[in-house]
Image (spheres, rainbow, N blue to C red):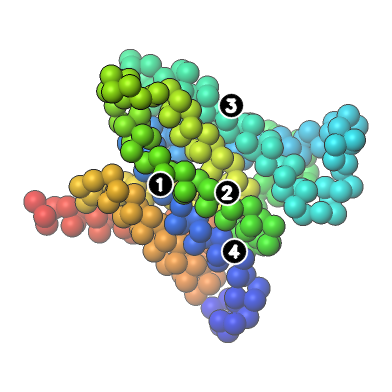
Amino acid sequence: MGDLPLDLIWELFGYSILAALVAGLVVPLVGSFLLVRRTGFYGVTLPQFAAAGVSFGFVALPWWQTHMSWLLDAESLGDESHLALGYHLQWAGLFTMAGLIGMTLASKKDGLEAGRVAASFAIASAMTILFSHASPVGEIYVHSLLKGEILAIDGHELGALAGTLALVAVLLAFFRRELTLASYDPDLAVVLGKRSKAWEALLMLLVGTTVSVSVMTVGPAVLFGLLVIPPLVARPHAKSMAAFLLLSSTIGVLSAAAGVWASFHFDQPLGPTLVAASALFLPASAVATRCRG
């Protein structure tokens, strides 16, 4: 596709390019709070739970057609892309929130939390494969999603992604101080009279919402990279939470732009190419940190 004129590329894949840029702008903000909470591994595991939910949606479709057709029938799911998006989003959201609540409740200060998160990732990965294998249609769709071929995003999906992430960004900005305190030191938040549990619950809701919608649109591979890599790159160079968030978002947008260019220029899947572009910032950050002493 490197030989296609720019106007044709934009006409064919404009929605996908915009989706990648929107995700690059907002998703690293959510990942920054996960890193502050010392739960950065959630950024790898939660998208896999969302993918398992999408796979399960295909398995549950015959049951849905029999028992829930009064709410939304299978024929409408096939004819209306926005209805299909809503159907699969409910399963992605359900599995994401279940995984998030489970990992949060199971977290203990015994040094084994990383192991529990790794086990959760293995379980979610197995569920994704088993559910998709049980549905031939689901297997094709999920395989494409996991591979990172996200060039078929339509206007409904872009609208859902942009609207959801815009709301998430506004809430993160508006409640930045409270969420930072509750994430970094919940005990101090209680001492200062803050409702630590309520702010943690809000953050988990924003994380779950971001993961659910992003997996259905830009896919797990892009979500993996943007949740984890830009905050890791930005953290050593930020002297305040505001600077940390701004730098993470900037690196995310630059990664998305570089990934889009490289994907079309070298004819590679957009998702993995975007993640590879963001990974190039890691050695650059390490060199800059060492030079700074």
Provide residue 81's location: percent of width, then percent of height: 77, 54
For mark 1, what is the residue? 173
State which mark lies toward you, 2 or 4. 2
The residue sitting at 91% across, 32% down in the picture is 66
State which mark lies toward you, 4 or 1. 1
For mark 2, what is the residue? 164
Q: Could you say whether the residue bearing mark 4 is in a helix, strand or loop?
A: helix
**Distance between the alpha carbons at the discs numbered 2 and 1:** 14 Å
Q: Could you say whether the residue bearing mark 1 is in a helix, strand or loop?
A: helix
| Residue nearest the viewer, comparing 72 with 227 | 72
Q: Which residue appears farthest toward the left when viewing the image?
A: 293
Q: Could you say whether the residue bearing mark 3 is in a helix, strand or loop?
A: helix
Crowd tier of the residue under label 3, counting other residues whose Cα lies within 10 Å: few below 14, some 14–19, many 20 or above = some
First reached walking from the N terminus: tag 2 or tag 3: 3
136 sits left or right of 282 in the view: right
Q: Could you say whether the residue bearing mark 2 is in a helix, strand or loop?
A: helix
The circle drawn on residue 16 is 4
Circle 4: residue type: Ser
First reached walking from the N terminus: tag 2 or tag 4: 4
**Distance between the alpha carbons at the discs numbered 2 and 3:** 20 Å
Circle 1: residue type: Ala
Image quadrant in which you'd find residue 99: top right
For mark 3, what is the residue? 98
Q: Decide: is 188 above or below 177.
A: above
State which mark lies toward you, 2 or 3. 2
**Distance between the alpha carbons at the discs numbered 1 and 3:** 26 Å
First reached walking from the N terminus: tag 1 or tag 3: 3
